[in-house]
Amino acid sequence: MFNPDRPRVLVGWPSTNFINLFIINQMLSIPELVAEIRRRGGDTQEALARRLGVSFPTVNAWERGRSTPRPDHRRQLEELAAELGITSEITVLVIDDDPATGELVEAAAGEVHSAITVASALDGWEGLVLCGSQRPRLIFLDILMPGIDGLEVARRLPELEGLERTEVVFVTSSNDDRILARARELGHDLLAKPLDVDLLVDAMAGRLELG
């Protein structure tokens, strides 16, 4: 639901589609959007201020959450975000050698929000590659996989840039207390297989703030 005190914007549509950009506002807060625009564009706050025709203190206040842009400045930010390819979609990644998990997550995503897209990897190595390229907001990560298992994938995630906001939920059919304990030591929640679509919906809605 739209909160006027904490505007959130989804960007990535053509720059003329301002109505959708304003109404469909689930992904980035203004501070997050300004920071992402600067990161993608390689701008300092001073450089972004010059680009937008505002003062440095104004951009600094936006990024620190002390003020929000006027509608004309918000429109400029949305246009610039679209030019930089800041996505309008929220990516959820499934890393599991069982394709059925991806199908269940996709079904759950359809119940949560149309802005969610689901990507799938069938092994840990492919999953790490997709993490780096797609920067998912949420990962459902199987623990028991051939090759590099989910525990090792989780340990390597902090080495990847751009995943600071990414959350991980382990999924597993294992009842081995040692494996489950190692998973919990990594600080991530865990869902037991067989997976329940309603629990997946709750996991997504809560962690993506879309519920």
Image: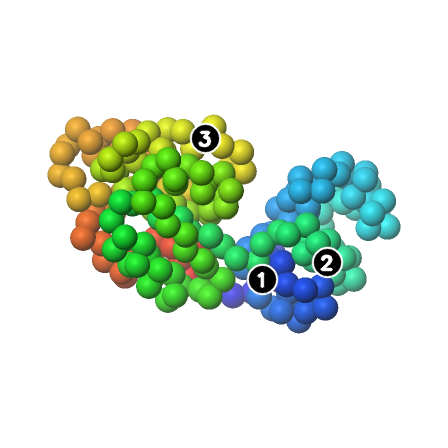
Q: How is the image coloured?
A: rainbow
CA distance for labels 1 and 2: 14 Å
At 64% across and 49% down in the image, what residue appears? Answer: 33
At 29% across and 59% down in the image, what residue appears? Answer: 104
> Is residue 200 toward the left or the right of residue 210 in the image?
left
Provide the residue designation for mark 1: 25
Answer whether labels 3 and 2 touch (C-beta < 8 Å). no
* Coordinates of residue 74 in the picture (x, y in percent): 73, 58
Residue 31 in view, yes or no: no
* Coordinates of residue 181 in the picture (x, y in percent): 22, 30
Q: Nearer the viewer, mark 3 or mark 1?
A: 3
* Coordinates of residue 103 in the picture (x, y in percent): 30, 59
Report helix, strand or loop for mark 2: helix
> Is residue 162 toward the left or the right of residue 100 in the image?
right
Q: Nearer the viewer, residue 125 or 150?
A: 125
Question: Sequence-wise, which precedes: disc 1 or disc 2?
Answer: 1
Provide the residue designation for mark 3: 158
- Res 196 → quadrant: bottom left
Q: Is residue 86 above or below residue 181?
A: below
Report helix, strand or loop for mark 3: helix
